[in-house]
Structure formats: C-alpha cells, structure tokens
C-alpha cells in the first residue's frame, strides 16, 4: 500500500470498489437467475427497485470513502470496462452504480468527466436493452440525460431522453393501450424529440389526400390545375363554400376530413418544433 496520506485515502476507496463489484455481481446473478427461469420481464421492475436502493447506499459509502474528493474520476475503470466480474451483466450494473455515485457525489465534475460518464451510461443502456432489460436501460439513459442537462448539452440530453422513451416503450405489454400509443408516438414524431419526422407524415398525408380527391369526379367545371390547387391548399388553409362549388358533392366530405386532419397535424408539428427550438 502507498505510504502517507495518499495511501490512507486509497484504502477506503479500494474497499468501496470491492463492495461495488460484489453488489454488481449480486444484482447480475439475480437477473441471470430470473432469465433462466423465464421470468425476467416479470421481475425486472422489482430488481430495479432494489438496485436503486443499493445505489443510494453506495453513494453514501462512496462519499465516506473519500472518492468524491478526488479531482480525477475515482471510478473510471468501471466506465472503461477494465474490471473483471463473475456474472455476464455485472459490468453494466457496475457502470450504472459507478455513474450514479460519481455524478451525485460531493466532488465537482468537469465537462470532460461528464462526457466520460455520459458515454458510459449510453453504452451501458444500449447493452442492457439488447439483453432484454428495458427498465434498466431506461434508467441508464435517464441518468445520462440528466447529466448532460447539467452541462447544457442539449443534443445529448434530447438523444438520451429519446432513447429512454424508446426503452420505456419496449417495457410495456405488447398489445396494451399504452404500448400502442407509444408505438404511434414513436412512428409519428419520435416521442416529441423528432419533430421533423412529423413533417414527413404531413407530406405523405397531403399527397394521399390529393390523389384521393383528384380521383373523384368534378362536375362544377374546375379544370385539373384548379382541382389540384384546392386539394393541396385545403390541408393548410381550409377552402370555403365558393371554392367547393367549382368541384362536386363527393369532394365535400373528403375536404372536411382533410381539413380536420390538417389542423391536428399542423398544430402538433409547430408545438413540437417550438418546444425543440426553445427548450420549453
């Protein structure tokens, strides 16, 4: 052991690291056992709740061990996967624990520290999601998003919030109402973090309504270019009765459907875009 004050500080920190390894192995063993029994999806939430309690206790022990007083990352080896473990998922669990205690300790984190921890959490979240642990993955992505917000990294925060929402969607029962709603949000606008995706759907809807309307008969004397203008413009600016007279009766109900659809999608797009641009 190193002599002097530095050695004295290192001893409790090394003891804490050993306890972190043991805790990660224990949680990973519990997850592995549930996986062998085919009950992973059923018990993941309970295991995660116990992990959260462990992480809070680990934070207190980390502070007492003096790890939070160091300028450099005290647990960097856990973020760099330089520690050996007995269980398969133990490195990911340990990275989660290490990220939590360092990000919420008493020491000042630099932006480079936050980048290392955030990157570790994103990598860990992806690995946990691939292992069939969406709730653990959501926890990792949310931790990373919170850390990025502390350093005004808007793109990193939004990316992790999107990934957390995607992991949460996977955790929902396949055919439940919440899962179907989450699927719809993912496809239409990426849970609110991909507003331009909604613009693509708007273009698809405009094209679809235009084709539908132009396939209907026109008995009011409107030529093809006038009919095309009405079909496209109605999505953005609803047509009046005078415009419809140039067309025909079958156009009216379709134009009404297009009007209401346009109102919903336009307003939703601008709300999401403004929220994204101004960080509301």
Image (cartoon, grey):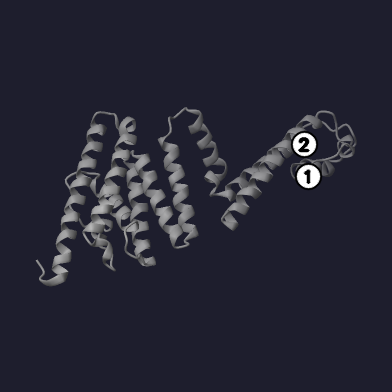
Of circles 1 and 2, the one toward us is 1
Residue 49, image quadrant: top left
Q: Is residue 33 left or right of residue 110?
A: left
Pointer 1 and pointer 2: residues touching (CB < 8 Å)?
no
Residue 104, image quadrant: bottom left
Q: Is residue 133 above or below residue 145?
A: above
In the orientation shown, which residue stands out farthest toward the bottom? 4
- Residues under labels 1 and 2: Cα distance? 18 Å
Image spot of residue 194 (x, y percent): 55, 49
Note whether residue 158 is visible. Answer: yes
Image spot of residue 40 (x, y percent): 30, 33
Image spot of residue 190 (x, y percent): 53, 45
**Where is mark 1, residue-wise?**
237
Q: Which mark is residue 214?
A: 2
The quarter in which the N terminus is drawn is: bottom left
Give the mark nearest the N terminus, 1 or 2.
2
Q: Is residue 177 above or below residue 230?
A: above
Q: Residues within 10 Å of mark 1 (few under 14, many from 20)?
A: few
Q: Residues within 10 Å of mark 2 (few under 14, many from 20)?
A: some
Image spot of residue 272 (x, y percent): 60, 49
What element does badge 2 sit on?
helix
Q: Is residue 73 left or right of residue 184?
A: left
Residue positioned 37% across, 62% down in the render: 114
Residue positioned 41% across, 49% down in the render: 142
What element does badge 1 sit on?
loop
Residue 135, image quadrant: top left
Residue positioned 85% across, 31% down in the render: 248
Q: Which one is nearer the viewer's eye here, 105 or 250?
A: 105
Q: Is residue 156 left or right of residue 113?
A: right
Q: Is residue 81 above or below residue 130?
A: below
């Amino acid at each position: 052991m190193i002599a002097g004050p530095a050695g004295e500080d290192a001893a409790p920190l090394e003891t804490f690291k050993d306890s972190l390894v043991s805790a990660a192995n224990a949680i990973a063993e519990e997850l592995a056992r549930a996986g062998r029994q085919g009950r992973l999806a059923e018990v993941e939430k309970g295991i995660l709740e116990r992990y959260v309690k462990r992480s809070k206790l680990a934070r207190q022990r980390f502070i007492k061990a003096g790890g939070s007083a160091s300028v450099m990352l005290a647990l960097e080896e856990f973020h760099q996967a330089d520690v050996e473990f007995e269980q398969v998922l133990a490195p990911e669990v340990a990275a989660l624990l290490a990220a939590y205690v360092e990000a919420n300790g008493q020491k000042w984190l630099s932006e480079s520290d936050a980048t290392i921890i955030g990157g570790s959490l994103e990598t860990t979240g992806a690995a946990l999601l691939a292992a069939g642990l969406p709730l653990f993955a959501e926890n990792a992505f949310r931790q990373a998003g919170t850390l990025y917000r502390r350093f005004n990294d808007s793109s990193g925060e939004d990316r992790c919030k999107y990934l957390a929402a995607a992991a949460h969607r996977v955790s929902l029962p396949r055919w439940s109402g919440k899962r179907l709603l989450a699927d719809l949000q993912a496809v239409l606008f990426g849970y609110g973090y991909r507003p331009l995706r909604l613009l693509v759907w708007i273009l698809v809807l405009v094209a679809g309504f235009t084709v539908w309307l132009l396939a209907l008969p026109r008995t009011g004397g409107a030529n093809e270019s006038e009919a095309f203008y009405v079909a496209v413009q109605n999505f953005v600016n609803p047509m009046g009765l005078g415009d419809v007279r140039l067309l025909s009766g079958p156009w009216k109900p379709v134009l009404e459907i297009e009007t209401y659809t346009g109102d919903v999608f336009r307003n939703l797009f601008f709300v999401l875009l403004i929220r994204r641009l101004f960080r509301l």
